[in-house]
Amino acid sequence: MTTHMMIELIAVLTAVRGDVPQVMTIDHGRQLPSGPLESTHRSLQAGVRAWVERQTGHPIGHVEQLYTFADHDRILATTQGRMIAISYLALTRSHAGETGWRDWYDYFPWENCKSDEGRASLALIERLLCHWVAGMGHPAERVRQWQRCVSLFAIGDMVAWNDELVLQRYELLYEAGLVAEAGCPPDRAVPGQSMHHDHRRILATAMARLRARIRYRPVVFELMPEAFTLLQLQRVMESLSGVHVHKQNFRRLIMQQQLVEETGEIEERTGGRPARLFRFCGEVRQARQFVGTKIPLVQP
Amino acid sequence: MTTHMMIELIAVLTAVRGDVPQVMTIDHGRQLPSGPLESTHRSLQAGVRAWVERQTGHPIGHVEQLYTFADHDRILATTQGRMIAISYLALTRSHAGETGWRDWYDYFPWENCKSDEGRASLALIERLLCHWVAGMGHPAERVRQWQRCVSLFAIGDMVAWNDELVLQRYELLYEAGLVAEAGCPPDRAVPGQSMHHDHRRILATAMARLRARIRYRPVVFELMPEAFTLLQLQRVMESLSGVHVHKQNFRRLIMQQQLVEETGEIEERTGGRPARLFRFCGEVRQARQFVGTKIPLVQP
DNA sequence: CCGACTTATACTCAATATGAGCATAAATGG
DNA sequence: CCATTTATGCTCATATTGAGTATAAGTCGG
């Protein structure tokens, strides 16, 4: 029953610079940082935390297990065993001047519906997917897959865009042979940088998880500086989720949930009226950490 | 880097008999079924599916990875390596006359707030936790832990009961030394059967995940018979979540989401007025599988 | 057959939450 | 001074939610 196995830990280390969500990479942005599980680690979580903190020098906040893979792609040629990869999402604060950070949306331009670039890549994807289903032999299958395209990419406004379906959208593009990882020639692929192995897939899993988490848990604050204005908070939420929020309603919900408190300081350089600075009042709320938050994310 | 490892798959196979959620066990209810990962399995998910279907003879519906553990408790004495356990939640339909099925709430009586037994065990837990924090030396720590007790077990109606915090509640009881797994003598433990290793913890993880899933995904129907009345559906939802539902509002939400359609048949043996039978219209909704459902779960 | 009891189903109503907009305040740069 | 920008307070229509009333259509015991 005991076989040769290699356990690999893969971290999706995420931070926000300015308003832009970023991910730590190695190999010129082609891979996520990963390392073997060491026997000195008390637990998997502790292993990831120690190893990431050693690599980056930063303390990390939220750490969360994503998924464990053991597909046959991962069988090692050299040994008899199989490769198991356990992926983690880790959040950290600032990272001025470090190398290896890449924008989320370099890999997933279509997930950033806020930007013109994102909308352009969505329009292109719509055409490519239309072409893909048109080439299908079986009519029933064609209808089924088109409905899948429509609901995942919100084609034709029949359904609303769901920002949490990052993984499902990537998998559809993979099946349609529109990403480089699926063996597609680069000139016929959808825009967006590819990664080695299944690392872009793991990044998609992490993005989806984080988009889901920030709605109901106060994890955004792990990515924010100590003090921030409400607009800065809103911009980070928007760039993480890729969708717009109504400014006044966002403020209302944040305030009435007492997630933040005023620092008393004022941010002058807003470009308009100065804004009050806030801090996350996590200490006070520590016991109430299970009540959950509710943050409104609506369409533009 | 390659070490001796044993990869163990652990399944939390869940079904509903009558209105009662049950879990498949071995070893007279002391363990969850588990088996080694075999190299013939294409993927982990396929491995779990094949192995569970072979064991039970039933087709299983929803399968979902829960968590991967590799704590030092799991280090094997016999080999140099470490034990990795990957746990899965799997749902299946009926299981008339099979052995090994146990009620969820045999292990977690306090999670069934609907029943008198559940409320009684909650009252007992409240007293035991009160005693636990009273014995703490440091006042600040005492306050902190008591707030944790209050918010997890909804003591004193300051916060509402959150049915999804199954794991957090179990971990609190473990820390407080009130469960047999923490080395507590049986007569001083909280009611509820214990399990070997960390299997009750894994069951808690599964219960929490399923309680979260049934709110937003139509997975309940994987546990229902082909045709059912709305009251049957409601009772299953209630027993899975452990809380009561307002009958009329439940009907309203189910109907207006078009999750079900009438079969045309009538269930006569309701004990009152006969009820219309419904079936899940998953085929029609297959493409819309991402829209999500919303099922109201409120307090008694 | 009657009346107590059970469940099914339709409908109403108030409280709250949500989405969208208006208005004013306070800074900037010409 | 005025256009522009951002901050912040407030209103309002609509949708959602929680809870209750009312009625229908069976059962069962006498």
Image: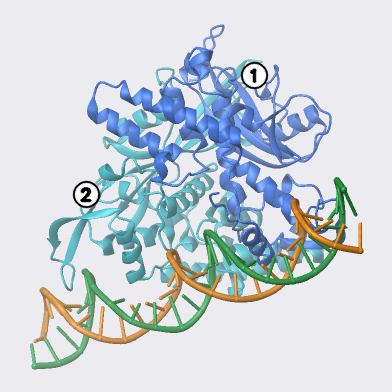
Chain colours: A cyan, B blue, C orange, D green
Looking at the image, residue A68 lies above or below residue B32 = below
Dot 2 alpha-carbon crowd within 10 angstroms: few under 14, some 14 to 19, many 20 or more: few
Query: Visible in this render: residue A64?
Result: no
Seen at 76% across and 40% down, the residue is B18
Query: Tag 2: residue type?
Result: Glu
Q: Quadrant of residue B11?
A: top right
In this rendering, would B68 be left or right of B276? Answer: left
Give the mark count.
2
Numbered circle sitting on residue A271: none
Disc 2 to disc 1, C-alpha distance: 48 Å
Residue highlighted by disc 2: A226
Instruction: State which chain disc 2 sits on.
Output: A
Q: Within the image, what quadrant is residue A106 found in?
A: bottom left
State whether discs 2 and 1 lie on one chain: no
**Mark 2 vs mark 1: in front:** 1
Q: Which residue is mark 1?
A: B30
Query: Quick check: A217 left or right of B89?
Result: left
- On screen, residue A186 versus residue B11, left or right, reads left
Judge whether residue B146 can be spotted in this image.
yes
The amino acid type of the residue labelled 1 equals Arg
Toward the viewer: B39 or B243?
B243
In contact (CB < 8 Å): disc 2 and disc 1: no
